[in-house]
């Protein structure tokens, strides 16, 4: 078998799963319910964030919070302050790709 297969957790419960963490990329799957999200932090690489379902509420650096719906892909530069969360009743599901993979 040439390919390596990964499985994402399905459902509506909170998940932050590190699916692929290698020297090339970090591929992270996240599910958040209303009021859930990540602690405020700075991006440690270029971040590509895909909204799979729901509405993402995100504050970057000192900007006000912007909202992005399902099907949106965001590119967030290295060393950007991020405040990621779900402020809506619908479940939020994200795929986050960090490229290049952050140095240890």
Image (spheres, rainbow, N blue to C red):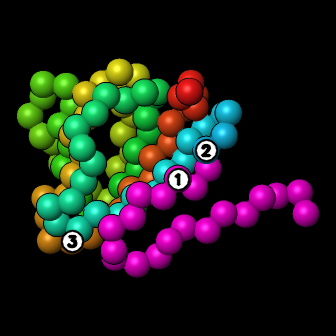
The part of the image, by quadrant, that contains residue 77 is top left
* Numbered tag placed on residue 90 in the rendering: 3
* Numbered tag placed on residue 91 in the rendering: none
Q: Earlier in the sequence, mark 3 or mark 2?
A: 2
Q: Does residue 33 show up magenta in the picture?
A: no
Do the residues under discs 3 and 1 have CB atoms within 8 angstroms? Answer: no
Residue 71 seen in this snapshot? no
Check disc 1 and report the residue beneath it: 18
Residue 11 seen in this snapshot? yes
The part of the image, by quadrant, that contains residue 76 is top left
Element under disc 1: strand
| Image location of residue 101, percent across then percent down | 58, 31
Q: CA distance from mark 3 to mark 1?
A: 23 Å
Segment colored magenta:
1-20
| Image location of residue 56, percent across then percent down | 24, 53
Please tell me whether mark 3 or mark 2 is closer to you in this view: 2
Report the residue that reaches farthest toward the top. 79
Q: Is residue 19 left or right of residue 35?
A: right
| Image location of residue 19, percent across then percent down | 57, 55
**Position of the C terminus by quadrant:** top right
Crowd rating for badge 1 (residues with CA inside 10 Å; few <14, some 14–19, many 20+): few
Task: Pick whichever, 21 or 4, lies toward us.
Answer: 21
């Amino acid at each position: 078998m040439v390919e390596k297969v990964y499985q994402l957790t399905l459902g509506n419960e909170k998940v932050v799963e590190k699916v692929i963490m290698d020297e090339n990329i970090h591929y992270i799957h996240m599910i958040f319910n209303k009021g859930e999200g990540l602690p405020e932090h700075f991006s440690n690489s270029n971040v590509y964030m895909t909204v799979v379902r729901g509405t993402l509420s995100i504050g970057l650096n000192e900007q006000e919070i912007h909202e992005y719906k399902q099907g949106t892909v965001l590119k967030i530069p290295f060393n950007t302050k991020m405040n990621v969360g779900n402020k809506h009743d619908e479940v939020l599901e994200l795929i986050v790709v960090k490229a290049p993979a952050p140095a240890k």
